[in-house]
Image (spheres, grey):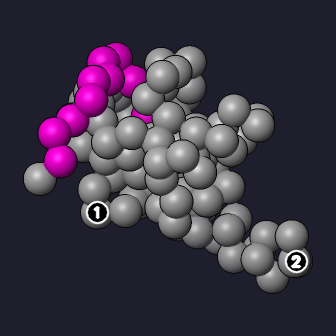
Amino acid sequence: MSRFRCLFLNFLLAACCGAFASSGEVEWTGWISDAKCGAKMTGYCAKACITAGEKPVFVTDDEKVVPIANPERTKNFEGEHVAVKGSLENGVLTITSIETAVRK
């Protein structure tokens, strides 16, 4: 990965975390993607990357990328459109429930 791309991805992740710095209960719909591609890829690509070792992330329907504290909760939802409930602390989502969501 080029140095510029790596710096850009780190900047993007930091910006997203700052946007979600508050704490509290959340309910969102979005996608389970991988940390490498974030909002750029979903579906089979995200599932393949997570299977290969990338960390799963939650991408909201408006394309905000949120790290997940308990990635084991996303098993079998990789690349899927989902509804999640959980808590957000310091920009990191702890999922309490996850289910397949109907696309609008």
Local packing at callout 2 (Cα closer than 10 Å; few below 14, some 14-19, many 20+) is few
Q: Which residues are magenta?
A: 91-103
Identify the amino acid type marked 1: Asp
Front residue (pair 81, 6)? 81
Residue 104: x %, y % from top left: 11, 53
Question: What percent of the width, then of the height, locates residue 83?
Answer: 25, 34
Q: Secondary structure at mark 2?
A: helix
- In the image, which disc is placed on residue 98? none
Residue at (67% x, 55% y) in the render: 36
What residue do we see at 66% from left, 41% from top? 48
Local crowd at mark 1 within 10 Å, few (<14), some, or many (≥20)? few
- Residue 63, quarter of the rendered image: bottom left
Q: Position of residue 82 (x, y in %)?
A: 30, 36
Residue 68 at x, y percent in the picture? 52, 34
Which residue is most to the front?
44
Mark number, residue 3: 2
Q: Find the distance from the CA under tag 1 to the CA under tag 2.
A: 28 Å
Mark 2 belongs to which amino acid?
A: Arg
How many marks are shown on the rendered structure?
2
The residue depicted at 47 percent of the width and 48 percent of the height is 43
Q: For the residue labelled by badge 1, is the local secondary structure a helix, a strand or a loop?
A: loop
Residue located farthest toward the left when viewing the structure as drawn: 104
In this rendering, would 35 be left or right of 29? right
Q: Is residue 32 visible?
A: yes
Instruction: Specify whether 60 is left or right of 9.
Output: left
> Residue 62: which numbered mark, if any?
1
Which residue shows up at 76% across the image and 37% down it?
A: 52
Is 95 one of the magenta-colored residues? Answer: yes
